[in-house]
Image (cartoon, coloured by chain):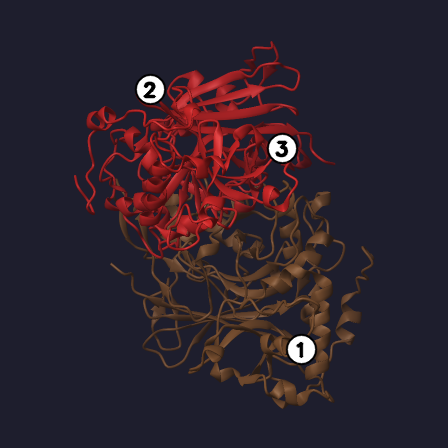
Chain colours: A brown, B red
């Protein structure tokens, strides 16, 4: 169904066009690379061990193979020209706000510069740094953060634990992407240590709550959609998809015990306010285009403002690993796929705007926890340990219900093409003891 | 109990020192003025009908009697010097971020400039505009908006309607300020028209929800506390009070029918995302200092992170009026007082930070709906019409359960000193039909 000049192709056509694009950067052609020419994700870096002001400055960059390309410098020396200076802010918000034509213009230019046979290899090589020498930062300024709850297996699992299998999904759940507003101030980039939160905890044994470090501190495996183009009133699902700039991995750290006590009647608040980690690379829509898939068949008819004009989800393999401080290796806890979502990011954004809520450049929308049908596909410890009742045994022999101090959690994401991958890098965080 | 060098005085001592400070601006000495020298609230204006770029530019200003004083111009011409230029941004965030010493320095300087006997009357007069010729704008940039639920009468009324009188207050309610994150993008200044939202509505008569304009669109009478000084981890109640820059009136427009269907299990979302109106003047803490009062006695002991070092609420008379499009006069719907709150803004801010949530300059914290014990003291139509079952009769003879298109709602707030008032201006909004 073509809308707004766009042709929605079916999955088999899409997959057939899906092959490695060659770069003169050899490491980008390795079939195991996360960052081939097809990807070109956007980050912000400084040079590790850099001593000059210029080296220490945060600059916009693009990942290519084992390197980052300093596009801020390339814009300053005229190699990249987008009409206005859009890559000088130390974050991607100016380009994000500039709209889809400029997004495409930059991608086209990067493919020229980095493609096999480029005549501008020298100027690029002068602006490249080994990824191992790059410190990565928040790729964009988050203006507001919204977290959804649109994973059906997750919502069913959590609902079953708390309300029994008959009432697992709330009555509204199939009709709209349920969500709540989170805290933009607590979104941090991968690698940032996470301090275990304190909060009010209420045990059924005691009459009054206590204030103490969370004992049920958890992860949530999610994807984050980033709004580029602002809107001031309701937008359709198709418009919403157009307004999305790109995607990151997202771990919405959650204190289940704080949540259990505080969440009635207005929802999660301090349970989700400690930190939310995102991966350092924004993977853009064109890189993911070959991996578009449809949301699942509907149990109930969707209202018009949520109907989809085409496939709006993506086939992205996701995993979660956990490594205790004492272990030498991480244990993979979960393998699932973004296509498990019941509502797409575009549907979520359309719903978010439906009341007239203004959406702005830098809005971050968490998908909700992504769990599959199988036990090893569950995207939170709450589900994996079934509310703490079924401890997990790690490869080191240790067991876990929820996170322990010193644990490092890493999310990974990858779409698999023919002979190449679109990777998201990793989204990691290590749990630090509460500061008291 | 003195803390951090501060002496908490009791209410009778405070009231005794509470007298009009005279200004050479005669209208400021009128006992009915909202803006005497004691007040000095901060806004942002441009000149109505201004034609030059300078006149049309948004500038920081202070209300004094029937005038606004253009402090941006006074800073540029050297009359005000705060060390750094802090009044040039077209909003108050730079001063807010600069901290309490600069806040006090500006207030001290304004009292010199505007006090009776000032030697700098001429330079001020050249920078003054009649309030009737000033267009007012958002006084600060809201980075995030949080809305609390700390009015005990309101929570009891709403809980009684939905869950019966035995279960009116949720078990957590007396132990902490229950709150949820709202949308900063939808906060607008007084006078902005409010478009009735559409959303999913579910009637018990129908199996599936419909998407339609809200039929139960409501007001919430609140105060907003504005964070000036940022914090990166948990803060005490006393520190929280220090970090608050000032206060505004706040109307959290609420679609009760959207809320009823969407709010389980994660709280209000699109029901509260259409708009939140604030008054155009930030009334600062020193202006309100004589009106500090204590929160009520506690039914349960508060945990340490919520204990108060002194009186942290304010005695502020509040009212709500409604004027239908067809009427010549507004009808007063509600008269109540900010001192009805169960938790103070400082307690709310301390709780907000308790998980380690970073709080930033420009964070806006809504108090929750402020209702008193009596029917005419209820701060929402939901309570005033008891869920729509008891329509109100307006002075014009029309009746109301919820808002109709064309209705104009005005909130007012005033602290009453000896021969003077500290006013907040008004917080108004007119309901416009849904755009379809």
Give the Cα distance between marks 3 and 2: 35 Å
Which residue corresponds to mark 2? B419
Circles 3, 1 touching at the beta carbon (< 8 Å)? no
Q: Assign the N terminus of chain A to one quadrant of the image.
A: bottom right
Label 3 and label 1 in one chain: no
Q: Is residue A290 left or right of residue B75?
A: right
Report which quarter residue B21 is drawn in. Answer: top left
Label 2: few (<14), some or many (≥20) within 10 Å? some
> Residue B331's spot in the image, x, y percent?
54, 15
Q: Which mark is residue A78?
A: 1
Q: Which mark is residue B193?
A: 3
- Name the foreground residue: B375 vs B60: B60
Q: Chain of mark 3?
A: B
Callout 1 secondary element:
loop
Q: Chain of mark 2?
A: B
- Figure check: A118 above or below A290: below
- Figure check: B48 above or below A74: above
Q: Assign the C terminus of chain A to one quadrant of the image.
A: bottom left
Label 3: few (<14), some or many (≥20) within 10 Å? some
- Name the foreground residue: A169 vs A137: A137
Callout 3 secondary element:
loop
Give the Cα distance between marks 1 and 2: 67 Å
Report which quarter residue B322 is drawn in. Answer: top right
Circles 3, 2 touching at the beta carbon (< 8 Å)? no
> Residue B193's spot in the image, x, y percent?
62, 32
Callout 2 secondary element:
loop
- Name the foreground residue: B341 vs A212: B341
């Amino acid at each position: 169904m073509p809308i707004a000049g766009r042709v929605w192709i079916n999955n088999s056509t899409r997959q057939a066009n899906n092959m490695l694009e060659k770069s003169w950067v050899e490491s980008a052609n390795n079939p195991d690379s996360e960052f081939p020419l097809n990807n070109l994700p956007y980050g912000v870096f400084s040079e590790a061990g850099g001593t000059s002001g210029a080296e220490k400055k945060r600059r916009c960059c693009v990942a290519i193979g084992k390197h980052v390309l300093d596009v801020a410098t390339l814009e300053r020396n005229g190699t990249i020209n987008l009409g206005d200076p859009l890559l000088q802010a130390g974050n991607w918000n100016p380009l994000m706000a500039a709209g889809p034509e400029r997004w495409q213009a930059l991608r086209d230019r990067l493919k020229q510069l980095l493609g096999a046979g480029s005549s501008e290899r020298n100027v690029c090589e002068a602006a490249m740094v080994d990824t191992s020498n790059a410190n990565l930062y928040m790729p964009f300024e988050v203006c507001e953060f919204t977290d959804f709850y649109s994973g059906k297996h997750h919502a069913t699992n959590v609902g079953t634990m708390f309300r029994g299998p008959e009432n697992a999904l709330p009555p509204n759940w199939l009709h709209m992407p349920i969500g709540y507003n989170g805290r933009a101030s607590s979104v941090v980039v991968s690698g940032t240590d996470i301090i275990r939160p304190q909060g009010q905890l209420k045990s059924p044994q005691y009459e009054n709550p206590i204030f103490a470090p969370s004992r049920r501190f958890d992860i949530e495996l999610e994807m984050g959609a980033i709004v580029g183009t602002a809107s001031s009133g309701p937008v359709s699902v198709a418009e919403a998809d157009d307004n999305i700039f790109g995607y990151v991995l997202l771990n919405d750290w959650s204190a289940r015990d704080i949540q259990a006590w505080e969440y009635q009647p207005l929802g999660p608040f301090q349970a989700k306010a400690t930190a939310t980690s995102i991966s350092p690379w924004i993977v853009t829509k064109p890189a993911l285009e070959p991996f578009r898939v449809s949301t699942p068949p509907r149990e109930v008819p969707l209202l018009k403002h949520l109907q989809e004009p085409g496939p709006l989800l993506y086939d992205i393999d996701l995993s979660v690993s956990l490594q205790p401080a004492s272990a030498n290796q991480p244990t993979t806890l979960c393998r699932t796929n973004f296509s498990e979502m019941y509502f797409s990011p575009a549907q979520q954004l359309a719903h978010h705007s439906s009341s007239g809520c203004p959406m702005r450049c830098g809005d971050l929308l968490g998908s909700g926890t992504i769990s599959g049908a199988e036990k090893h596909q569950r995207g939170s410890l709450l589900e994996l340990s079934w509310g703490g009742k079924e401890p997990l045994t790690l490869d080191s022999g240790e067991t876990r219900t929820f996170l322990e101090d010193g644990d490092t959690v890493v999310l990974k994401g990858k779409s698999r093409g023919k002979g190449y991958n679109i990777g998201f890098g990793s989204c990691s965080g290590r749990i630090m003891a509460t500061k008291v």
